[in-house]
Image (cartoon, rainbow, N blue to C red):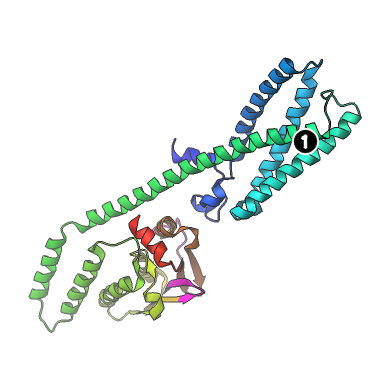
Amino acid sequence: MPYSSFKHMLEIASPWRADGLPLSPGSRATCLSSRFFWIFQALFWFASTLSLNVIVETFIEVHGAAPIIFGRIATGVVMTALLHLAYQSPWMLSAKGWVRWPSVLLLNVGMCLASSVVWVELIRHGAPELPSANFKSITVARFYSLALWNSAYFGLSFMLSHQALKLEAADARLATRSSELKQLQSQLNPHFLFNALTLVQNKIDPASPGQEVVQMLSDYLRYSLATSKPLEPLGRELDALESYLEIQRARFTGNLDCFIEASPAALQVLVPPMLVQPLLENAFKFGPKTSAMPMHIEVTAAIENDVLQVAVGNSGCWVPPGSGDSLGSGLANLRRRLFLLLGEAATLEVLEKTQTVVVMIRIPILSLAQADLLHSA
């Protein structure tokens, strides 16, 4: 079944809902979509009606069994619909397992007792029921039916969750392979490229400023073409970006004011490779269209409350998504890549100030165990 079909079965309820990103595993297990839930309800209670009818007709001698069966099934439908609403509540979805499952048990016990009290009163006022029905027998029957319903409900939810997780993992692998393919396509022939740069460098006067630009370009290309891991120290990319900025300074010939400032601790934090470069590239692409000259660009990185904050700011105005060459898709791709590697804890937001646009990335600082797990994935 395609992933899009599972998205209809599993209600998307995370902060990434607008971007089409999946739920966290803890929430997905109890979050069936409304449409799929009512299909499940119809099948379960139809089977229950047939089973109850066979039991009553076979083992219990009673006249007019239809109203009794209808009353019990209708009660079950109402009870389970209310339980489903409770399971889908934001509090239940965000609760830890050691809180959620005792709460599920208490909800079911409370529902059984409440419905039994109501039905005892209805029987006293003439509602049709089995001759031997009393509070205890009704409660036991209610609890047994709810136990079966919960087993089917959560079993189905976990099965769909498992399949969706497998599809998400495949999606992540596909995205990685696609990125690798694009990188390979862009590399062409690295040996030829570096040989050509060396030839150009040999043809330029050693005292010419062009010598430094070619060297910076060669250094940056070595970084961008090198084999990378899922996570690398931020300092590795920032060192390479110093060469990238030197090339841009030569390009803008005095019309560029840019710098990189990062704390020593921030340089050691593990981040996805090529994290900052796409943001800088967009700044150089769109900044000159709306910024006064000289254009100002700054990259800052610091740690605050155990979270790495990387900001790339440029003078100029924000270009909204959908406006010609807007960078909206680039930001969406980077946000998606952050999610696939680091989950919902990694965020990206755009802050627009007076004649300044800042893209802020916040990444949790991973433990060595977490980093090793990603490296081995």
Q: Nearer the viewer, residue 233 or 202?
A: 233
Which residues fall within the magenta stretch? 303-326
Q: Residue furthest bottom?
A: 207
The location of residue 202, given as percent across then percent down, is 8, 75
Q: Residue furthest right?
A: 125
Tell me, yes or no, if residue 153 can be seen here: yes
Residue at screen point 33% across, 64% down: 273
Q: Secondary structure at mark 1?
A: helix
Q: Amino acid at mark 1?
A: Thr
Asked whether residue 344 is drawn in magenta, I would say: no
Residue at screen point 13% across, 69% down: 197
Quadrant assignment, res 166: top left
Location of residue 56 with respect to 301 vertically, above or below:
above
Q: Look at the image and tell me in which quarter the N terminus lies.
A: top left
The location of residue 370, given as percent across then percent down, is 41, 62
The location of residue 189, given as percent across then percent down, is 15, 58
